[in-house]
């Protein structure tokens, strides 16, 4: 995919827009942090960050992708859908993709009640809920890239919310000791790298699958040592992430989106900034590229 066709947005602009999205209450996103991480995921998948409000939901503090967005991405990837039945009692469709074959998926009210129990949404909007179940299962079966590694909101609502973390924590003094022992941070601070400016005629970076995997391993390591959500957002907004999602194959874009979502979900939604007088932890400044 040509990097010049991928819309990107600076982190500062994304933060401003995230506040507006959360305050508007128009899209079911309650906080700027929720809006910002969904925007980062959208940008990592090669779409404009503002499309996050259209394509994603936050259900039980988990990101979820709407069935309509899954189906759209499935069709854009070459898939087709033929509906055999779409009523208040039965949704039945055949999904086809040139690379993965064909599958027929059906959901009826009896199966939905056995799986999820009696739900108000199934009583009020049975056809729409059954349709979403069929779309989610069919797309996940043939082309899981279109799910972005997420559940559809109706599915996510049936997953119990994560319990708050009650295990051991690292005290600030211990954090300072650990940070001092990490050579990567010191090396990166001593030798800052100049930003890479890609000219309009410059070809995208070409990597083998093995090189892409090594790049992903570095990103996974960088995300694994973070302490706060804003650090995840900072990494998600880096140019190297935007370049990787522009130049990388679909499986790389999926891995990036999945790792960012998992890293964001590790931290409590309302974790306050450090105010104990100690130096705040800083994310590693070395670029994963």
Image (cartoon, rainbow, N blue to C red):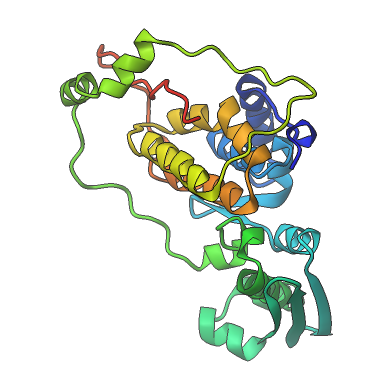
Question: 189 above or below 35?
Answer: above
Q: Residue at image x 60%, y 66%?
A: 154
Q: Residue at image x 37%, y 16%?
A: 188
Q: Position of residue 197 (x, y in %)?
A: 66, 17
Left or right position of 139 against 75: left
Q: Quadrant of residue 27?
A: top right
Q: Position of residue 163 (x, y in %)?
A: 34, 54
Q: Position of residue 263 (x, y in %)?
A: 43, 42
Depth order, front residue of 283/161: 283
Q: Residue furthest bottom?
A: 110
Question: 165 above or below 194?
Answer: below
Q: Position of residue 36 (x, y in %)?
A: 59, 34
| Residue 161 visible in this rendered orientation of the protein | yes
Q: Quadrant of residue 190?
A: top left
Depth order, front residue of 253/42: 253
Left or right position of 288 against 80: left
| Residue 237 visible in this rendered orientation of the protein | no
For the N terminus, the image quarter is top right
Q: Residue at image x 65%, y 22%?
A: 10
Q: Residue furthest top?
A: 190
Left or right position of 161 against 18: left
Q: Quadrant of residue 273?
A: top left
Q: Residue at image x 61%, y 24%?
A: 11
In the rendered picture of this protein, how many numbered marks are placed on residues? 0
């Amino acid at each position: 995919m040509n990097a010049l066709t991928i819309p990107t947005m600076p982190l500062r602009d994304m933060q401003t827009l995230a506040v507006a999205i959360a305050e508007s209450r128009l899209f079911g996103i309650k906080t700027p942090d929720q809006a910002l991480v969904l925007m980062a995921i959208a940008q990592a998948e090669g779409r404009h960050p503002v499309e996050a409000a259209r394509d994603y939901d936050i259900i039980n503090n988990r990101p979820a992708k709407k069935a309509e967005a899954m189906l759209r991405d499935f069709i854009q990837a070459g898939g087709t859908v033929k509906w055999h039945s779409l009523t208040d009692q039965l949704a039945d469709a055949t999904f086809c993709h040139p690379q993965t074959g064909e599958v027929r998926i059906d959901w009826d009210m009896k199966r939905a009640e056995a799986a999820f129990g009696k739900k108000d949404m199934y009583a009020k909007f049975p056809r729409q809920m059954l349709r979403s179940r069929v779309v989610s299962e069919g797309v996940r079966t043939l082309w899981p890239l279109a799910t972005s590694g997420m559940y559809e909101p109706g599915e996510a609502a049936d997953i119990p919310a994560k319990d708050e973390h009650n295990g051991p924590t690292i005290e600030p003094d211990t954090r300072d000791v650990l940070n001092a022992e990490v050579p990567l941070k010191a090396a990166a601070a001593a030798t800052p790298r100049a930003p890479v400016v890609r000219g309009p005629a410059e070809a995208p970076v070409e990597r083998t699958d093995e090189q892409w995997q090594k790049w992903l391993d570095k990103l996974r390591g960088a995300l694994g040592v973070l302490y706060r959500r804003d650090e995840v957002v900072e990494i998600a907004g880096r140019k190297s992430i935007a370049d990787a999602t522009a130049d990388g194959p679909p499986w790389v874009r999926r891995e990036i989106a999945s790792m960012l979502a998992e890293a964001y979900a590790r931290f409590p939604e309302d974790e306050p900034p450090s105010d104990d007088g100690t130096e705040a932890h800083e994310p590693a400044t070395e670029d994963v590229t």
